[in-house]
Image (tube, rainbow, N blue to C red):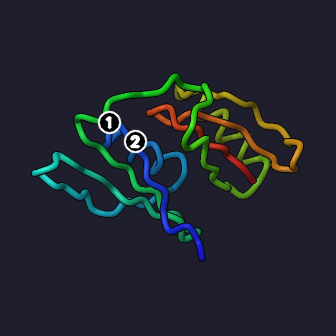
């Protein structure tokens, strides 16, 4: 078994799609629209075969306090292949105005990672 995809609600669907395409080399499928539910989404494919679904509906608006822990999805990790790429991507995100919650480091469980927030405040661990 494997996790087929992860789905997250977003406020600005196009901005979120661009974020994952720009910084994580995601490839977007076609935009899906269900007019009766005012639901739109994209599936993003990564080279590893994993997928992320970005979903938007105008009535889903609550954003938890960014950077604070809560019940539910804590974070998801994207492997970028090297410590140098973790460092450079973290710095690029910072320079482009995205919040960095954790600087690049080796964690107690042996991961080299940083932690950044996407445009909707979802925590992303950027790992080797």
Please name the residue shown 89% across and 43% down the image: 108
52 vs 94, nearest the viewer: 52
Check residue 42 in the rendering and tell me which mark sits there, or answer none: none
**Dot 2, how many residues are within 10 Å of its Cα: few (below 14), some (14-19), or many (20+)?**
some
Return the residue at label 1: 12
Q: Using the numbered discs, state the Cα–Cα distance from disc 1 to disc 2 in whole angstroms.
A: 6 Å
Percent position of residue 54, x then y: 38, 50
Return the residue at label 2: 16
Percent position of residue 120, x then y: 44, 33
- What SS does tag 1 mark? loop
Above or below, 100 against 33 in this view is above
Q: Are marks 1 and 2 in contact (CB under 8 Å)?
A: yes
- What SS does tag 2 mark? helix
Please name the residue shown 72% across and 58% down the image: 81
Percent position of residue 125, x then y: 66, 44
Relative to 91, 9 lies left or right:
left
């Amino acid at each position: 078994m494997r996790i087929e995809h992860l789905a997250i609600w977003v406020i600005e669907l196009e901005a979120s799609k661009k974020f994952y395409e720009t910084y994580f080399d995601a490839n977007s499928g076609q935009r899906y629209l269900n007019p009766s539910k005012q639901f739109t989404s994209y599936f993003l494919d990564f080279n590893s075969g994993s997928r992320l679904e970005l979903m938007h509906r105008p009535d889903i608006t609550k954003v938890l306090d960014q950077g604070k822990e809560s019940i539910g999805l804590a974070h998801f990790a994207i492997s970028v292949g090297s410590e140098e790429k973790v460092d450079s991507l973290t710095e690029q995100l910072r320079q482009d105005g995205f919040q960095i919650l954790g600087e690049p480091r080796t964690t107690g469980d042996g991961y080299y990672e940083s932690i950044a927030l996407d445009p909707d405040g979802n925590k992303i661990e950027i790992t080797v």
